[in-house]
Amino acid sequence: MSRRKDFSGYLFILPAIIVILVFRFYPILQAIRMSFFKWGMAGPLYTVGLKNFTRLFIDAKFYQSLGNTFWYVVFVVPLTIVLSVFFAQLLNQKVRGRGIYRTIYYLPVVTSIVAISVVWKWIFNPDRGILNAIFGFFGAGGLKWLDDARGVFEIILTPLHLEPSGFLAGPSIALVALIIMAVWHNIGYCVIIALAGLQNVPEQYYEAAKIDGAGSWKTFRHVTIPLISPTIFYLMVTQSIFAFNTFTPVYVMTQPPGGPLGTTKLVVFYLYEQAFKLWNLGYANAIAFVIFIIIFLLTQFQRRFIEQRVHYE
Amino acid sequence: MNRKFTIHILLAFGAFWMLLPFFWMISTSLKTQMEALRFPPTILPQAFLFSNYLEAFRQVDFSRYFLNTIIMTFGTTFLVFITSTLTAYAFARLKFWGRDTLFTLFLAIMMVPVPVYLAPSYVILSRFGWIDTFLALIIPWSVNVFSIFLLRQHFKTIPQDLFDAARIDGLNHFQVLTRIVVPLSKAVLITVGIFQIVSNWNAFLWPLIVTHSDSMRTIQTGLAYFAQAESTNYPLLCAASTFTTAPLIFMYFFVQKQIMESFAHTGLKE
């Protein structure tokens, strides 16, 4: 019977194929096609050629959202990874209560971003929030957090009579608040992945380092880091993409959404606003197209330039 | 001894910051609004006001939101089980023309980030007349490539002899799948199911876009709506945040290992 022509393979994948064609493949094609049209939900369709893209090139708000996203990713990803490797290294020692610490660190990962955003908005409250209460106790309270549009580089450099503005002002304090929350939210996930990487390092490498008389920092720097570099690379890729796609905290925490002065408007939120608040679907697709290209380049770039330096066993 | 002590101090310092928002959420949820606005704040509530929970639950239709989320979660999970066992079986065990190319294509399509096809998906769903229905919440997510991938890996490890024996006994492929393969794959199916539960429960952007009416809100869009409506009543907001996250956190304490495992394979999802 196995000689008979067998179509059951196609039959078995048919349901999945239909769903993927209709709800993934076709929308992606449409996204590309629609970016050449001007289109509201109801009205007529105008072919505008490349107008959506030329408009994109001169749209200051789009550039601002790209700049915001750049700072957001550039701060969130390294901070999360450095901290999580640090804690994973601690958890990799033979100390009591490791399981409990692991459980605690991972807790935010299973909590919804909406709920987390609601709570952190309260924590960051400038007048009543617990963060300013704690910082105030150490004499460092008084930041306006989510209401503060000043860039961090602007704050640091203004006393030196350099006054960077726009993109060079760096992430606003409000965006820093979102960055802090994102690091807090993702760290548990990265700790678990980094820990798995650390546990895969064969014991004899450490013994060899010990015999050579390497101290613990030297061992960490020259044995551990190179050996877990594939894990770090994986985290960099996934965390960059994840950070780039951030939407919910902007929607829930900032007032007006994306404010103050548009300094927390990340690019995915800008797309949402164009598509579902202003109903510029064609224009939104041009933005989507750019997002797609950037994410694609991001992964390729990281593959090229970082993977070369990654040590695979 | 000294070294161990330092490690504990550092780990505890980390744990303090990880737990602080949860502690603060629960503490605030039990305060009166007057007490919540005090500065510097009280650490623990003076009187434990459990009625905040009831009030938050009643102010907007949270029971409806819970029900909607449960329907969405069950619907999606059920369909994902069906589509991914069938597809994974075909990809792992059946021979047909274009199989490996199709599988690569599936994986490639998964790499495209959600924002890219958000707007066209909305257009398609509205053409179908599915906007603001459960169909829009469930059907587009009824295939999950990660689940297919995981199950395919597992199906490949099942010894060929078992399949040969079953075929000789006259079972067709569908019977082999349901009677032999699925019972042998419980652990993987549980991982798939848990991932579905967590990601459906926490889904926000998609429900926000494809539903409009109050009666179709899910837990997360409902909570976001409540946060806008009651933007300054922090005890009620914290109470709502607590009871919307509690079911997952409760589940997390029981199936921690499986949750970590399924997330490790997929990465995070917003």
Image (spheres, helix red, strand yellow):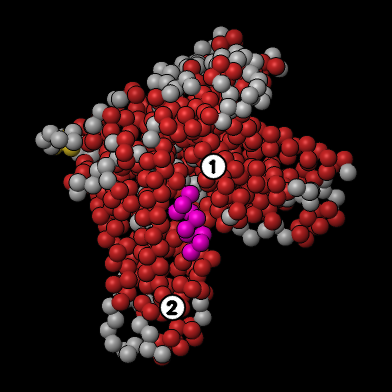
Element at badge 2? helix
Residue B179: assigned label? 2
Residue type, numbered disc 1: Ala
> What percent of the width, then of the height, locates residue A85?
66, 44
Residue occupying the point 37% across, 41% down? B64
What's the magenta region?
B189-198
Q: Earlier along the polypeptide chain: callout 2 or callout 1? A: 2
Magenta portion: prevailing SS class? helix
Q: Residue furthest right?
A: B1
Residue occupying the point 25% across, 28% down? A278
Residue in the foreground of this view, choosing between A197 and A19: A19
Q: Are marks 2 and 1 on the same chain?
A: yes
Residue occupying the point 23% across, 31% down? A279
* Magenta highlight on residue B197: yes
> What percent of the width, then of the height, locates residue A184?
58, 35
Q: Dot 1: few (<14), some (14–19), or many (≥20) neighbours within 10 Å?
A: few
Residue in the foreground of this view, choosing between A117 and A302: A117
* Magenta highlight on residue B1: no
Q: Which residue is mark 1?
A: B246
Residue in the foreground of this view, choosing between B29 and B175: B29
